[in-house]
Image (cartoon, grey):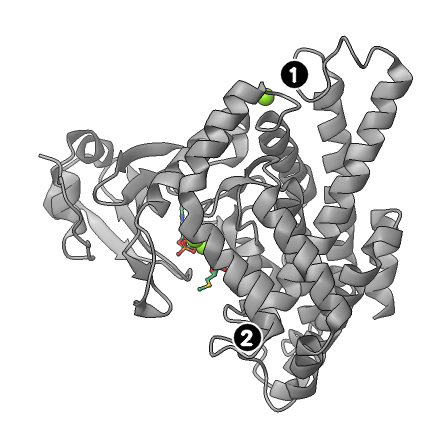
Amino acid sequence: GKATSFRPLSENTVADYVQSVSHLAKRLGGSKQDWAVKEVGDGNLNFVYIVTGASGSFVLKQALPYVRCVGDSWPLSLERAYFEVTALQEHGKHCPEHVPEVYHFDHPMALFAMRYLAPPHIILRKGLIAGTKYPLLAEHMSDYMARTLFNTSLLATSTTEHKAAVAKFCGNVELCRLTEQVVFTEPYMIASNNHWTTPQLDEDAKSIREDDYLKLEIASLKSKFCEKSQALIHGDLHTGSVMVTQESTQVIDPEFAFYGPMGFDIGAFLGNLALAYFSQDGHTSDNSNRDEYKEWILKVLQDTWNLFKEKFLLLWTDKSQSMGDAYPAGVYTSLETHKLAQKIYLRDLFEDALGFAGAKMISRRIVGIAHVEDFESIENPELRSQCERRALNFAKDLLKTRSKLASIEEVIQLIRKV
Ligand code: ADP
Ligand code: SR1
Ligand code: MG
Ligand code: MG
Ligand code: MG
């Protein structure tokens, strides 16, 4: 039978667990001794097992009651598995093409099973480091963000539905507070979690702690993150949460999901593309010329936003899709007012996205706790710090000038200038 209390699994005990859940066992085919279990978790928080059998496979992900990359000195709620499954299911309803199917959820065990994204699926961040192009990336990510964000917002739902959903996801407070701490707080003060390429970036880190203007920008973004229940956001949409092939794009790992500002997801994705861009000069040891590749990254950045905007507006304009309480049809009767409302909404969203992109880039990725492989894999500290400094300077510019940037093309000009 199913476990009724929490027990951490290991490579040695996963097969016994699977055997006790008959529909999972059936999915694999054959019997226990034929099943292969491999732990592949390379994220910061959880354990991930690939389970394969004679006729099927799946991935089993389990949360432990602490932060994996730190250890049991940093406790973290097991409930994150519940929020991850709930978000996968909700986002999967709106965008099944880009969200892996959930097969099983065991609440007390804080684990779930989902579709195994088999090779050649690879974590996007790793593909970007390797210099691989994904021709459908912007198309797919804009689709995912437009559909999940639009359909969980008041543009598509009633305030009755929305409030109930907001209340439910308020329970994911521990994960939200983790983000508040590592993105909006610690990088701007002395904190033991912070680290950076030292001594090269010592002055850069110090200047962040002494930049009052930057701190005020961060304060307003933090309040938006905590207060703006705009849509069910993924909450951790960096390039390590996307798996890709030439044909497929799959978004995993929404354990930070809650009703927050849409710009946080869009900014996470765009900001991480910018990090990938600035790290490219550190990845030419294989004698590759990355100039053309860098242009491709910028094109993805540009297309993602422009396509997102187009698709989001299409959903809004399509009457059957926009039945939400935000703009009652009886009030916004003129096409002109409707268009103006859309323009203002998208303008605000763009500014939010740029702000969060900058915040996420600075935060843990360069001077905070959780760095990214894009830079960490550059062995030479001189070279690494040069790449990181350019990313940092762009992020600071973005935070300070975002209200004056009129289009994504202007953002790209800013990237080129740094
Ligand atoms: P964490 O929450 O700890 O960051 P992730 O959900 O990001 O965990 O998963 C960690 C790693 O496990 C991913 O980087 C990926 O390599 C692998 N992984 C996760 N889900 C799948 C999946 N559905 N199919 C294949 N590999 C996966
Ligand atoms: C302890 S901070 C860990 C980070 O990894 C997760 O994926 C989130 O990005 C979080 O900020
Ligand atoms: Mg992850
Ligand atoms: Mg839909
Ligand atoms: Mg995660």
**Which percent across, then down, holds residue 104?**
28, 34
From this view, report whether residue 39 is shown above or below residue 120.
below
Q: Note whether ligand 2 is within 8 Å of mark 2.
A: no
Q: Quadrant of residue 42?
A: bottom left
**In the image, what residue occupies the spot 83% across and 55% down?**
411
Q: Could you tell me how far apart the alpha carbons at marks 2 and 1 are, in whole angstroms? A: 43 Å
Q: Residue furthest bottom?
A: 199
| Three-letter code, disc 1 | Gln
| Three-letter code, disc 2 | Glu
**In the image, what residue occupies the spot 27% across and 44% down?**
111
From this view, report whether residue 359 is shown above or below residue 237.
below
Q: Earlier in the sequence, mark 2 or mark 1?
A: 1
Q: Note whether ligand 4 is within 8 Å of mark 1.
A: yes
Figure quarter occupied by ligand 3? bottom left
Mark 1 = which residue?
Answer: 321
Mark 2 = which residue?
Answer: 376
In-front residue for pair 27/400:
400
From this viewpoint, is residue 332 visible? yes
Horizontally, residue 218 falls left or right of residue 164, namely right
Q: Quadrant of residue 322?
A: top right
User: For the residue labelled by badge 1, is the local secondary structure a helix, a strand or a loop?
Assistant: loop
Horizontally, residue 363 falls left or right of residue 358, namely left
Q: Residues within 10 Å of mark 1 (few under 14, many from 20)?
A: some
From this view, report whether residue 190 is shown above or below residue 106.
below
